[in-house]
Image: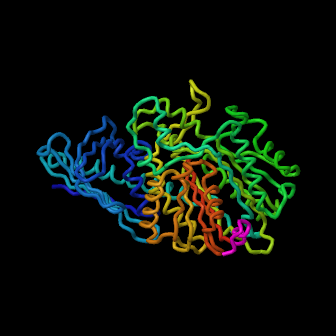
């Protein structure tokens, strides 16, 4: 029996080290010792690895069975080169926390069989070199990945206070049930989409409705509750993913923001469009927050109109099974939303924090392309992978950004997450609770009746709950966007006289 080990200290939490260690798909990008790994980390499952000797030459294939797995702490497998009697090894990876943000990582292998005894000096030398090289590479990879998951855009709350002054929305009157949508698929799919997503229906544009008309209607609704007129706005930002005008014309120039500001009478406002997938509106709020605190403007509007259900119609022509990359397109709904953000006139801000970060390595998990044989586009989404990333990375990010302002999840009265599906929202709720040991008082769900309305989803939900009088004075509301890219954004509001514009003074 021969036993070898190598240890190194890594300035990253156990979760970041574990995530890198078990991401077999990307070993070739950083691992100088185990150049390839394919298989599962589930106990009883098998994994095939190819080890690269330091002297070069062909990679050695090893087939192993997972013996033990303790997430964020230990992974152990046992494998053989050709046959167990010829040579076998039990390999253990251990992650030992030694601080709040630091771990000791240990690789250990116990060799048995005739070949290890025969080649003991060479085996010991080569394995030790491989362990040491892999440990250093893992340290660099995990520390880099953990730094990338910090809130790059979380600025100090300096300057004047900022508040959300009014909110508005616009929804098409036409409803499309999930049952009717699935009945329209060209192929018999046998997919129970309502059970899978919890979505009963969504709103869809009818004749004369498009991205521009929904955005203008939402802007006017927002202004109807505002203390300000359109000419008081300094900036108008359009954040739509879809830019349909006159039906199915997708217009890039002139920008939608120009059409919107002219339609509502915001003639002196600067206007521009921005694109940040489903995080678009929250990104706009983040930008206005920074511009106001720096004294560049007094107030601005972020507005979006999403006529996005054409993706679902196009998906219905080709989708065949639950494994289709276009399945997420069937969850979409149309809608518009708008929000006015201003300098807090009384020095009492209701925007408590605003932060954004991007996990750019996941940018290819959701891709939109032109539809070859129909108007509009198609969207291809690895929804399960996006959900896995959001569940593994999201809770730590949210905990970090709340802690930066002295808050915890239990201080949040209403969490409004991006509305993808009921199942995904509930799963996220459990992941947050497991990570933080805490939970918000309420989690808002509107996807069941509106579908996923893309960039407008958070503010349609906020407007709905304000209309219904559910939000009380002093309630803290966390708006959470998780969008393809992969963007994660957080804005926390403290409800003030916002509720009074809806006739609620509770």
- The one nearer the camera, 421 or 206, is 206
Residue 501 shown in magenta: yes
- The mark tally for this picture is 0
Residue 233 appears in the rendering = yes
Report the side of 99 relative to 239 (left or right): left
In the rendered view, tell whether residue 286 sits above or below residue 386.
Answer: below
- Residue depicted at 76% across the width and 35% down the height: 253
Residue 87 shown in magenta: no
- The one nearer the camera, 116 or 439, is 439
Report the side of 31 relative to 478 (left or right): left
Percent x, y for residue 278?
60, 48
Percent x, y for residue 318?
47, 30
Which quadrant is home to the C terminus? bottom right
Q: Which residues are magenta?
A: 496-506
In the rendered view, tell whether residue 328 sits above or below residue 22.
Answer: above
Which quadrant is home to the N terminus? bottom left
- The one nearer the camera, 410 or 186, is 186
Percent x, y for residue 331?
51, 44
Report the side of 127 relative to 395 (left or right): left
- Residue depicted at 87% across the width and 55% down the height: 231
In the rendered view, tell whether residue 175 sits above or below residue 422.
Answer: above
In the rendered view, tell whether residue 488 sits above or below residue 504.
Answer: above
The image quadrant that residue 86 belongs to is: top left
- Residue depicted at 63% across the width and 73% down the height: 472
């Amino acid at each position: 029996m021969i036993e070898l080990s190598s240890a190194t200290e890594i300035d990253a939490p156990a979760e970041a080290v574990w995530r890198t260690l078990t991401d077999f798909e990307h070993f070739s990008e950083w691992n100088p010792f185990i150049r390839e790994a394919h298989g599962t980390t589930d106990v009883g499952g098998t994994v095939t690895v190819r080890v690269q000797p330091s002297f070069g030459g062909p990679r050695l294939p090893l087939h192993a069975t997972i013996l033990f797995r303790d997430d964020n702490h230990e992974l152990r497998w046992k494998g053989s080169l050709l046959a167990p009697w010829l040579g076998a090894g039990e390999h253990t990876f251990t992650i030992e926390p030694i601080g709040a943000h630091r771990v000791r990582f240990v690789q250990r292998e116990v060799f048995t069989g005739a070949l290890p005894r025969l080649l003991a000096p060479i085996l010991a030398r080569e394995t030790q070199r491989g362990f040491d090289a892999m440990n250093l590479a893992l340290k660099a990879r995990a520390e880099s990945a953990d730094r990338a998951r910090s809130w790059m855009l979380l600025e100090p709350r300096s300057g004047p206070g900022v508040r959300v002054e009014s909110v508005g929305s616009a929804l098409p009157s036409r409803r499309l049930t999930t049952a009717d949508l699935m009945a329209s698929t060209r192929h018999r799919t046998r997919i129970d989409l309502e059970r899978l997503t919890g979505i009963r229906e969504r709103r869809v544009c009818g004749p004369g409705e498009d991205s521009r008309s929904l955005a203008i209607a939402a802007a006017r609704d927002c202004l109807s509750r505002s203390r300000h007129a359109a000419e008081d706005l300094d900036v108008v930002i359009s954040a739509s993913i879809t830019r349909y005008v006159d039906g199915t014309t997708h217009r890039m120039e002139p920008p939608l923001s120009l059409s919107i500001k002219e339609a509502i009478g915001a003639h002196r406002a600067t206007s521009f469009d921005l694109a940040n997938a489903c995080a678009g509106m929250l990104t706009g709020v983040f930008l206005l927050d920074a511009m106001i605190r720096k004294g560049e403007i007094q107030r601005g509007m972020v507005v979006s109109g999403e006529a996005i259900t054409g993706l679902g119609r196009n998906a219905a022509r080709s989708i065949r099974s639950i494994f289709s990359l276009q399945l997420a397109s069937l969850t979409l709904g149309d809608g518009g939303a708008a929000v006015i953000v201003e300098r807090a006139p009384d020095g009492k801000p209701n925007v408590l924090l605003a932060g954004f970060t991007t996990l750019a390595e996941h940018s290819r998990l959701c891709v939109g392309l032109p539809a070859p044989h129909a108007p509009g586009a198609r969207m291809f989404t690895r929804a399960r992978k996006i959900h896995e990333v959001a569940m593994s990375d999201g809770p730590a990010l949210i905990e970090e950004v709340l802690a930066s302002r002295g808050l915890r999840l239990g201080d949040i009265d209403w969490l409004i997450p991006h509305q993808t599906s009921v199942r995904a929202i509930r799963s996220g709720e459990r992941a947050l609770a497991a990570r933080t040991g805490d939970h918000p008082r309420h989690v808002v769900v509107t996807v069941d009746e509106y579908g996923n309305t893309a960039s407008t989803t958070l503010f349609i939900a906020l407007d709905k709950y304000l209309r219904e009088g559910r939000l009380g004075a002093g309630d803290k509301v966390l708006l959470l966007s998780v969008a393809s890219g992969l963007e994660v954004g957080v804005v926390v509001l403290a409800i003030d006289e916002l509720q009074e514009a809806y006739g609620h003074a509770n």
